[in-house]
Amino acid sequence: MDYFIVIINAYFASYYIFHVVLILLGAYVIKTELRTAPVRDASQLPAVTLIVPAYNEEDVIVKTVAAIAAEEYPSFEIIVVNDGSKDNTMEALKAAYKLIHMSVVYKEYIPTARVRAVFSSQTMSNLRVVDKDNGGKSDAINAAINLASNELVCIVDADVIPERHSLFYMVQPFIQSKSLNVVAVGGHIRIYHGSNVESGTIDDLATPNKFIHLIQVLEYIRSFSMMRLGWSALNAAPLISGAAGIFKKTMLLQLGGYQKFSKGEDMELVLRLHEYHLQQGTPYKITQLVRPIFFTGAPSTLTELAGQRRRWHVGLLSSLKVYRHMFFRYRFKTLGLVTLPYLFFFETITPFIELVGYAAIGYLSVTQLLSFSYWMSSLLTIIGGCALSNLSAIIGDAWLIGLYRNRADLIKLLIAAIFEPLGYHQLNQWWKIQATFAFLTKIHLRSTWQPPSRDK
């Protein structure tokens, strides 16, 4: 039995060591990016189309458009797509921006649900609004891609608030790394809860007081910031967040846009971009940045959070199933040799191994077949490893990015880092197990068009 515990400990030690390695790689990416001087010559900044898919977003859509429009960038257009909302999203846009019908020929380069009308604004010359039948988020984005006037298209969620100059930083890799063929860039995503967002911008950035929001801030720092930057260092990032990503329009058209019925459209598209370029043998770069910051809302109840995490995990499983042919194939380089196996053997298998580990430790402890030293080593490996990766991410984030400079904010994050492994982590793993069974049994999960509640 002791050998079994040793194997469990070795597995989780490897899992968390991998976390720390990715965090260290992420720190390297941050330092490199912050040392690189951005191109500021307006004549070199490419025009960009910002795409905002919206479904039942009447509470936030006007503020989001206003925040995006405030971006100090020389040339950009905004295309909002109302994807058959059942609330007053369209009416809110019409009232706020005095929309009028445009006489435009809609060319379906990528097939989409029926476009009812295209509007322009009498108060904002660079705003267009598409009203269409409901087809899902991917379909809404594809409709905007069909209409986009510019080569670079930036997808932004309807509840996202970009920090000033975010677009300016997002285009930098396309300017500075032309020889590398940059095809996609991801922005830095953070949670706005706890901060003042009444003005449409982030004022007095602070960590939230609600634990459910605070724990998600911690997750975003660790997994969606430091670790994702680590994958970017290897040019093997499996995902660019749907909350803020910028792509080349010609490439999206060539690949047929976002897959309409994909369970995880963001990951599926990025993996398809990797696959295409690796099969062609052409140099390319998919990168994650830290300077362009986009703030987003987060679930405010356990029910909402559970639903979101189950959907995310089903999206991961779906993408891994579609691209399983890339596993351990040398032609797919780091993505196929490291990233995808990591996602399968750790992110999809770990919840089950952890469940077995807890059950085994409990049984062996009750039957006194497990020595106290092995019992302690197992708990320290599983719980201590999680806390260590959390603390590494917080220290790296505070040292290199420094969004939260207030001592009280750092103390709250450190407390969350210590207590996250003592309940919330296990709950998250349980949601992944539920999602896996849902995926394997084809149980339908709710659409991704489910905005979180937005209490601050």
Image: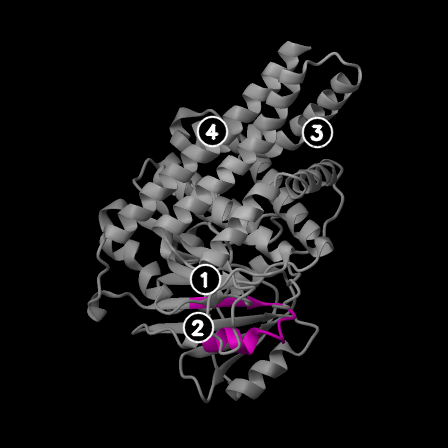
Q: Tell me where residue 329 sits by quadrant.
A: top left
Q: Tell me where residue 43 sits by quadrant.
A: bottom left
Which amino acid, by three-letter code, is at mark 3? Leu
Counting residues from the start of the chain, the first of labels 4 and 3 encountered is 4
Which residue carries the number 4 mark?
17
Q: Where is residue 351 shown, x and y percent of the image?
A: 65, 32
Q: Which mark is residue 68?
A: 2
State the residue in front, 362 or 122. 362
Which residue carries the number 3 mark?
355
Residue located at (36% from left, 38% from top):
25
Task: Work out whether 192 lies above or below 338.
Answer: below
Which amino acid, by three-letter code, is at mark 2? Ile
Figure coloring: one colour
Which amino acid, by three-letter code, is at mark 4? Ile
Which residue carries the number 1 mark?
294
Can residue 136 be spotted in the picture? yes
Counting residues from the start of the chain, the first of labels 2 and 1 encountered is 2
Residue range in magenta is 50-68
Q: Nearer the viewer, mark 3 or mark 1?
A: 3
Residue 435 vs residue 229: left or right? right
Counting residues from the start of the chain, the first of labels 3 and 1 encountered is 1
Report helix, strand or loop for mark 2. Answer: helix
